[in-house]
């Protein structure tokens, strides 16, 4: 035995048979020399379940003797506490990759039970962001820092790309804070699902990773002038051939009913009942259906009924708003950005903002939480309650605004002579 240091490592001559030089300070820490000339730092120990095991710390050249010694000390401490470094290393090597976990989720009943539009959204976030950044990593090797790095990469646009989706199709993948938040929140849910299914035993590495608050709901179409610009812009763009009629009508439907983008784009003729003036999605075909077990009914005002009625009739499974090509639902987001700019609408308002607008105006008009829940198909009361709170704040602001003229008069009055002084001046 001798001290394993640079001198002893350099002096270790190759022999016809493999041999190990053991350190005289750390029991089990040694230098393994093979007949091929390969030299590696090793640590031999006895786990609690008996027997002897030897783990390779690293090859000479990749680690200095001092670095290898520190790792050997770490292994010794782990064994003292009941750990099994080699067993853990083997388990990690045999652990599923994140890509395999994502595949399991995509083939699960939990994924199958989601609405068709939600499945498409989840699949896009998985394939174009999560798998790209984390797919080859072992599940057990993921840490909170790993997730933070993935979140930062998506947010900064490192996963942005133009991806071919067919002979003529092209998907423009963008990053940004919203995309990053949605992707990591989905990964957090997948890990929770995997735990419930006993697929993994490790903790959820997404826990504690802050992805930011959900977008606020106070960016809305404020008044009828905003809506007028929206509908006039849709009419103009459609008349000039810059937007297809089904796309324009799908956006009109969202504005009039507050339905979700996916509900409009994925609307099929079997969902429509114009005699009853409503759209009805079965429980497994809308966002909250799996949780509630109830269908989602959307009441159609007369104008919305007319929009649907003028679409070319199709079979039960055909889309109401026909896509230009392919079998997928009509794409709305890209066109919406052009409409928003041309109509002079708020920069941060997305198609979901039309839904928020309807809910907010319902609340400001005095609608109660239960009524908003019914109109928008919310599952949780807290979601609809936000609009009520926002409307209360908005009404307070409107009250302040309405009182401005009166307050100006009050201010002038406070600077005028008091009533007693006026009486004295008049000799009364």
Image (cartoon, rainbow, N blue to C red):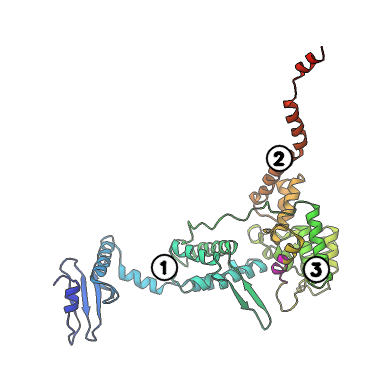
Residue denoted by label 2: 396
Q: x, y percentage for residue 30?
A: 21, 73
Residue 347 falls in which quadrant of the image?
bottom right
Determine whether the residue tagged by mark 2 lies in a helix, strand or loop: helix
How far apart are the two marked residues, 1 and 3, measured between alpha carbons?
52 Å
Q: Nearer the viewer, mark 1 or mark 3?
A: 3
Q: Earlier in the sequence, mark 1 or mark 3?
A: 1
Q: Is residue 224 above or below residue 91?
A: above
Crowding near pointer 3: few (<14 within 10 Å), some, many (20+)? some
Does the image show residue 380? yes
Residue 125 falls in which quadrant of the image?
bottom right
Crowding near pointer 1: few (<14 within 10 Å), some, many (20+)? some
Q: Earlier in the sequence, mark 1 or mark 2?
A: 1
Labelled pair 1, 2 in contact (Cβ < 8 Å):
no
Instruction: Tell me what residue is drawn at x 74 percent, y 42 percent.
Output: 398
Residue denoted by label 3: 237
Q: x, y percentage for residue 288?
A: 66, 59
Determine whether the residue tagged by mark 3 lies in a helix, strand or loop: helix
Q: Nearer the viewer, residue 258 or 393?
A: 393
Q: Is residue 333 magenta?
A: yes
Q: Nearer the viewer, residue 277 or 222?
A: 222
For residue 131, side relative to residue 145 (left or right): right
């Amino acid at each position: 035995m001798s001290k394993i240091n640079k001198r002893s490592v350099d002096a270790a001559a190759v022999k016809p048979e493999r041999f190990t030089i053991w350190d005289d300070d750390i029991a089990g820490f040694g230098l393994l020399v093979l007949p091929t000339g390969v030299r590696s730092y090793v640590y031999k120990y006895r786990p609690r379940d008996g027997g002897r095991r030897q783990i390779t710390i690293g090859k000479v050249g990749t680690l200095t003797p001092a670095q290898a010694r520190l790792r050997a000390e770490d292994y010794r401490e782990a064994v003292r506490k009941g750990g099994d470094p080699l067993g853990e290393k083997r388990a990690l090597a045999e652990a599923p990759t994140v890509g395999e976990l994502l595949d399991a989720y995509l083939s699960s009943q939990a994924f199958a039970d989601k609405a068709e539009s939600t499945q498409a959204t989840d699949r896009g976030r998985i394939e174009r962001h999560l798998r790209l950044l984390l797919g080859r990593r072992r599940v057990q090797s993921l840490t909170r820092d790993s997730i933070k790095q993935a979140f930062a990469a998506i947010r900064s646009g490192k996963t942005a790309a133009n991806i071919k989706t067919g002979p003529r199709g092209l998907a423009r993948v963008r990053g940004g804070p919203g995309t990053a938040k949605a992707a990591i929140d989905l990964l957090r849910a997948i890990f929770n699902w995997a735990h419930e299914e006993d697929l993994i035993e490790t903790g959820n590495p997404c826990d504690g990773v802050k992805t930011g608050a959900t977008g606020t709901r106070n960016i809305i179409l404020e008044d009828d002038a905003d809506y007028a610009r929206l509908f006039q812009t849709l009419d103009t763009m459609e008349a000039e051939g810059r937007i297809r009629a089904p796309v324009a009508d799908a956006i009109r439907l969202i504005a009039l009913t507050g339905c979700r983008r996916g509900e409009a784009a994925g609307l099929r003729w079997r969902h429509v009942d114009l005699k009853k003036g409503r759209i009805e999605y079965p429980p497994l075909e809308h966002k909250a259906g799996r949780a509630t077990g109830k269908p989602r009914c959307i009441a159609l005002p007369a104008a919305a009924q007319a929009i649907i009625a003028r679409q070319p009739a199709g079979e039960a499974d055909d889309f109401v708003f026909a896509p230009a090509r392919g079998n997928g639902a009509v794409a709305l987001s890209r066109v919406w950005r052009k409409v928003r700019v041309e109509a002079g609408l708020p920069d941060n308002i997305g198609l979901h903002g039309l839904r928020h607008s309807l809910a907010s105006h319902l609340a400001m008009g005095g609608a109660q939480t239960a009524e908003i829940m019914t109109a928008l198909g919310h599952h949780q009361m807290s979601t609809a309650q936000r609009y009520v709170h926002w409307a209360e704040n908005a009404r307070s602001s409107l009250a302040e605004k309405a009182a401005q003229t009166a307050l100006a008069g009050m201010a002038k009055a406070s600077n005028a002579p008091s009533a007693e002084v006026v009486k004295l001046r008049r000799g009364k």
